[in-house]
Amino acid sequence: MIRYEELLRRSAERDPDRIALVAQGKRTSYAELHAESERFAAGLVDHAHLRNGERCVLFIDNRLEAAIGIFGTLRAGGVFSVINPTTKADKLAYVLNNCEASVLVTQAALLPVARAAAARAASVRRIIVADVENDAAGDDIAWTEFMATAPAALDAPALGIDIDLAMLVYTSGSTGQPKGVMMTHRNMVFAATSITTYLEARNDDVILSVLPLAFDYGLYQLLMCVMMGSTLVLEKSFAFPQKILPMLASEKVTGFPLVPTMAALIVQLRNFKPEWAASVRFLTNTAAALPPAHIQKLQDLFARSRVYSMYGMTESKRCTWLPPAQLGKRPDSVGIAIPGTEVWVADDEGKPVAANVVGELVVRGGHVMQGYWRNEEATAKALKTGRYPWEKVLHTGDLFRMDEEGFLYFVGRKDDIIKSRGEKVSPKEVENVLYALAGIKEAAVVGVPDEVLGRALKALIVKSDDVEIEAREIIAHCLSRLEDFMVPRLIEFRDALPKTNTGKIRRSVLQAEAEGRTLPGDEE
């Protein structure tokens, strides 16, 4: 096994002129991406004095500097973490302090938030800012100056080995604070190898991704392209499908990763042009299951493409995939274990259950995380002893059933985490923000089934006596403090919320109600 930045060097040596990345209208070859990553690594060591294992946080949009920052950090022996650019200062400060980040990379538009967060994180020694002139960076350093004054390359072999920590991916936790999922170089290489195997990926593939690099589904589009030596066309979002979809044709795209929200927009288009789909060999979907009607429509629109339905979670990247030939027979299945791994549905003791019995999905393989950064309690809950005394297997917290032929079906989550727009949302984190708004006496957040979002966030609100507050005020308050995907779309005012004998809000009852079901013991 090798360290991940070595894969970039190999692709650059094998085919230096092939385009590695198309971003912001600029085409960057593998030779250029490798050279820039080497220079960034040298700058981290020379200017920022980054030492092996130290953390570099990338608070930045989908852009070339993000890719350079990722591979440059790895080349310098560091650990990278990409943070969603809609993250607010309080949460960014928490992340910076939690991982004790030494370097923060950001861009001009995000600089006020980055500076506000860094001011509360004593570990941050250097802020590097893209999109600013040298004299506008103030006490920070502009990207152009950082790169111009850095040595051309590190005068050293690989700094570390493959079992070193490579990245932290922050994901919502049930306590309301994000958890840093720890992945080594070996974890990343294993996951990327397994996924590219079943996708039958090739070095002449062109992948169009609008998924945030802060989202591991989006991040792995970059990682897998670098492994294969293929091309990634990187866009910021799918907010304007009429701008993005023509790129499938103009860039001769062969692979198009989707989430259900994107699929819903595509199948509703009235003017989808057949030439857009002509070069696409495969579509992938994860985050939530696609409705069967959407699967059929996608297959009609992308007639030459294979459609892959998959299931994964940050703690193991990908868990299952459904062979495209099975879509017609079992469209609601998320498939079988990815190559080189094992999965099973377990009872409370971790033992496999019989076919069609609901239990917790357990995952075994080289893609399973090392744990949650500095969170032993959460790690112990998720990672438990497996088949052998020395190994840990992942208890996902997700409920599944497996049919007689070994195909898996998602049933629901064991904890309170809600998946919306493909992202995991902690209701408690949203509720904490709601309670900070004067006039809110009680609040509970639930996930309402939604064909486009998977789950739409709904806030159930009890107002304080004699206080007038409108739904739009609540949404605006949340927009100013939370990432976009965490903002409730629906607000419902109530006189009271159900509680336990000890006064705790019965979230499980409210969630069941939102899904149109009744919990045992709550029947009328």
Image: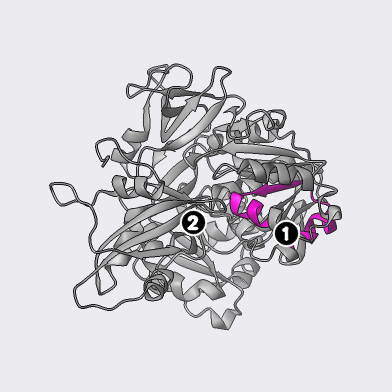
Q: Is residue 11 magenta?
A: no
Residue under label 1, please give it. Answer: 269
Residue count near mark 2 (Cα–Cα under 10 Å), binned few <14, some 14–19, many ≥20: many
**512 above or below 442?**
above
Question: Can residue 124 be seen?
Answer: no
Image quarter for residue 192? top right
User: Which one is in front in this view, the residue at disc 1 or the one at disc 2?
Assistant: 1
Q: Amino acid at mark 1?
A: Leu
Residue 370 picture location, percent across and down: 43, 36
Residue 398 picture location, percent across and down: 43, 35
Q: What residue occupies the far bottom of the structure in this picture? A: 135
| 196 lies left or right of 48 | right
**439 above or below 30?**
below
50 and 327: which one is in front? 327
5 and 265: which one is in front? 265
Residue count near mark 1 (Cα–Cα under 10 Å), binned few <14, some 14–19, many ≥20: few
| 129 lies left or right of 502 | right
Residue 295's mark?
none
Residue 227 picture location, percent across and down: 69, 41
**431 above or below 10?**
below
Residue under label 2, please give it. Answer: 56
415 and 79: which one is in front? 415
If the image is split into quadrants, where does the C terminus sit?
A: top left
Of the image marks 1 and 2, the number of the one nearer the N terminus: 2
Image quarter for residue 413? top left
Give, as a single range, the part of the protein colored magenta: 244-265
